[in-house]
Amino acid sequence: MNGEFVLFLGKRALETALLLSAPALAVALLVGFVTALFQAVTSIRDMTLGVVVKIAAVGFTLLLTGGWMMQLSLGFTNEIFNHMQSIAP
């Protein structure tokens, strides 16, 4: 195992983490912006409105993308274990 291989594994781990978190973060950002805009236009100052809507939207997104996220994480885990088998004698 050389330094180049360690950097490759670190890069793949960061890419996988970014792909796994991207749908939930994007939806939270979009819903938070729309909710804040709605609250600014209507002068509603209830802080829980933004949080509840954001939690519901992120939960729904996780329900929709959960299968894909599981496949992605299992594929990465299998890749790591295959690399471990090739390193070990």
Image (spheres, grey):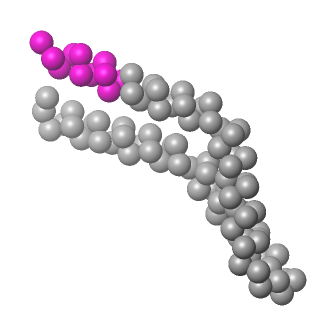
Q: Which percent across, then down, holds residue 71?
A: 54, 27
73 versus 59 height, above or below: above
Location of residue 15 with respect to 53 vertically, above or below: above
Where does the N terminus fall, quadrant-wise?
A: top left
Instruction: Please tell me in which quadrant of the rendered image residue 15 appears.
Output: top left
Q: Residue at x 22, y 16 (%)?
A: 86
Is residue 45 shown left or right of residue 75? right
Range drawn in magenta: 79-89
Residue name at image x 12 percent, y 12 percent = 89
The answer to which of 58 and 33 lies nearer the viewer is 58
User: Who is closer to the viewer here, 61 or 3?
Assistant: 61
On screen, residue 84 versus residue 17, left or right, reads left
Residue 24 within the magenta-colored segment of the rendering? no
Tell me the residue at 68%/58% (across/down): 55
Where residue 28 appears, as percent x and y from the top left, is: 65, 60
Provide residue 72's location: percent of width, then percent of height: 51, 31
The stretch drawn in magenta includes residue 80? yes
What residue lies at 53% left-to-right and 48% top-to-bottom? 21
Q: Quick check: can you spot residue 15?
A: yes
Would residue 30 be visible to someone looking at this image?
A: no
The main secondary structure of the magenta stretch is helix
